Image: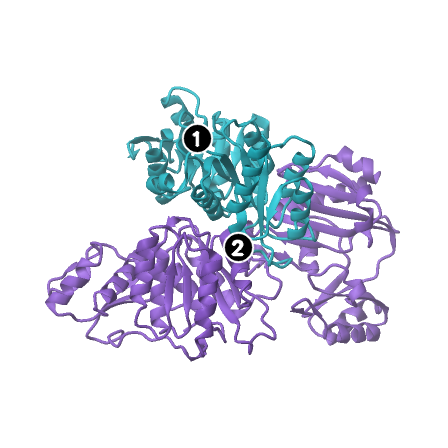
Chain colours: A cyan, B purple
Amino acid sequence: MAVIIDQNKRVMVQGITGREGRARTRLMKNFGTNIVGGCTPGRGGQEVEGIPVHDTVKEVVDASGGDIDISVVFVPARLVKHAAIEAIDAGVHLVVLVPDRVPVWDAMAIAAEAKRAGADFIGPNTLGIISPGKAVLGMIGGNADSAREWFTPPSDDLTNLGVISRSGGMTSSCGYYLAQAGFGLSTLCHVGGDSVIGMPIPDVALRMQLDDETDGIVVFGEIGGSQEERLAQLMNEGRITKPVICYIGGKAAKEGTRFSHAGAIIEGGRGTHDGKVDALTQAGATVVDAFGDLPDAAREIFSVDRANA
Amino acid sequence: MARLHEYQGKQLLATAGIGIPRGGVARTAEEVFDIASQFGGNVAVKVQAWVTGRKALGGVALVHSAREAQEAAEKMFTLHFGNFPVEEILVEELLDIEDEFFVSLTIDDANGSPLLLLDCQGGSGIEDRAESIARIPITAEGEISHEALQEVTGDETVSRAIAAIVSAAKEHEARSLEVNPLVRLTDGSIVAADCRITIDDYAVYRHKDLGIDIARELDHPPTELERVAYAIEQEDHRGTFYFAQLPTEGCEESNRLIAFHGAGGGGSMMSMDAVSNEGFTLSNFTDTSGNPSVAKVYQAARVILSQPNLKGYFGSGSGVASQEQYHSAYGLAKAFREMNMAIPAVIRLGGNSEDRAVDILQDACKDLPAPVLGFKKDDTPASCAGTFARLVEQTDTTNDSMQRTVPDFVGTGAASHFPIKCGTLWIDHLAPEIAEIVIRHSSGLLEPGSDGQPTPAEDIRDKDSELIACEIECLRAGQAVLFVDMPVKGLE
């Protein structure tokens, strides 16, 4: 089992003929993702990486003869709202929104439509999701060879960790350094750097809690917002019981200055580094002070757990 | 910045049909006197500043003569709030207030929807009554239930005004909009007595009428360099370039001031923490990521190096980048060469094509006055920061002595030149065997012309990144004969 994505899920790509769409379709296909089609308005009839291109999501759904589980969106930020709603209305179950700089009212409109239709979305501003050994969505790893080299698939012989991150680059970093430290990786998920996102840390953590291939959850959190606090709440309620190991970035950041992404800003004293560390620590998570300490902390926790068992 | 001043926010509310006090904005104490005189001197004098609790900080005065208003303004114009000097003062008629309401629209990240916080006691101390504040959902279309508003306010006119405020927030794509207080006057009319709006940075392009010049949240007025950087970002949408200058007061003479160039928000913040642990003061925070063009990384490095008093240049991102890292290596190498780098640079280039990236950077910069070192994903931020600290220790210069130079053939009649995006490609007049080398390194962009000289084989205007790569590869082959002249607007 894996959360969100595996090799059987039927996936399509919106904006497949663009610069990013093409490059990432190659990555996804070569890594094992089951891509059944793509679309770009006005480009129907073309092919990208041997994958048929249609004008609309509906046409992809019809041509592929059934349900599309997931659509990965690579269109300009100003068109993301339209693309996401088109996919949701065509019956796609999960939409992955890669573009950065999507206006927040557009993100909220997507959230409302997804809720109405019972669909999910990840992002905006997500690097993607990867289940090593199975499939990838988005652009994690950049190319299939790197993704295979960097991320060890989960196996019965290893302790397998899931990674949830608010930073794209750090999703890969967490995965790579944990694999180097001898862990298997079930799924790496970049939830997206924005403040309004479809599947925040607590939602992904709940899925990993139910995943028999995930033994523990590693979280790269950041200042701003309330995702880390809500994860702590789930731990307090006993809904997350697997070990949680966290790093919270932005200790040196000052209130009122935004550090690159829309989510990482402390406003009105909410979402501070200290507040997040305290909430998670009190809920029983292991919070490391330096990012480089994550793998060692994970090793320590799991050898302790094994001794207890 | 995407934060609007009180008077700007009130103008938006007025346009949406919501009452606002009569008055005007002044930039001098004399103007304050003039405006106050129109209201018989009975006015509120309010600094326009992004700060909470303005009144307690001496930023608001309620006066009863124009003379008093002017005196209050004279004091206020000497104030600073954070790093912002007071430049504008709003002068408004005094209001006969009967009731006050606290009205605040915020974006609830947990629910992914807007939310209205509403309380029937406005004014100060609202933080202490957090429990009693009503929370009313708002749709993504900017609609709010009239019944829910009525339940809290019990007043049709007030409820309608609040619905109009919510609608204005949606129209202008506010991330937050607070009216504290919304007031009912003794004559029954409803007036927004204060207003704070922050517009979504990502939506500013749809609201050119608001006149927001730099859609970035900073804790200081945008500096000249921040404006230069912002313009670069607006003109090139390949990847992201973010540049903010940080407070360095008292550090200028410390010999610990350095430039910071991150890649990716999370990796940048983590790297910033690592280099700060070595006792350095960061002159700036920069992030180039999302697969930026070579040109964008080059321009970012040029902007970064335009800050004074730098002792070194530290670059580091996530360390395991999905993007091809050689693009960044070309951009940095070009900037460091043009500036004849005299301060050490340590760049952590871990990720895809890291071997190639480190090789390009170190080889192209090997004859510069100061060491330029590249590192890979197995080098931790802490170890890179340690190496950097040792190199800075051994250097006794700052970047103030550095100046941009371009090759002698640039601008001469002997060289051929071609326009490209953001600049000009210059190629010296070449011997046939050297022309052959240049063409070989051009990835097919150049071919022999009728005179044997390299000539564009296709439309090269958008090939700025590839041409910079060609320039660096020619250099590495010992032939400094091709140059991409890409002046940064506002720097040269």
Residue B304 visible somewhere in the drawing: no
Mark 2: which amino acid?
Answer: Met
Which quadrant, please, contains the C terminus of chain B? bottom left
Which quadrant, please, contains the N terminus of chain B? bottom right
Q: Which residue is mark 2?
A: B270
Quarter of the image for residue A305 reads: top right
Q: Is residue A113 left or right of residue B455?
A: right
3D distance between C-alphas at marks 1 and 2: 30 Å
Give the residue at x 45% y 26%: A69
Image x and y of residue B50, in percent: 68, 61
Between disc 1 and disc 2, the foreground one is: 1
Mark 1: which amino acid?
Answer: Ser
User: Callout 1: 10 Å neighbours few (<14), some, many (20+)?
Assistant: some
Q: Nearer the viewer, residue B446 or B354?
A: B354
Give the residue at x 82% y 50%: B128
User: Callout 2: 10 Å neighbours few (<14), some, many (20+)?
Assistant: many
Element carrying mark 1: loop
Image x and y of residue B269, in percent: 53, 55
Give the residue at x 70% y 64%: B48
Q: Reply above or below: B131 against B437.
A: above
Q: Nearer the viewer, residue A94 or A161?
A: A161
- Chain containing the residue with disc 1: A
Counting every numbered tag in the picture gives 2
Element carrying mark 2: helix
Q: Nearer the viewer, residue A111 or A291?
A: A291
Where residue B305 is drawn, which disc sits there?
none
Q: Which residue is mark 1?
A: A155
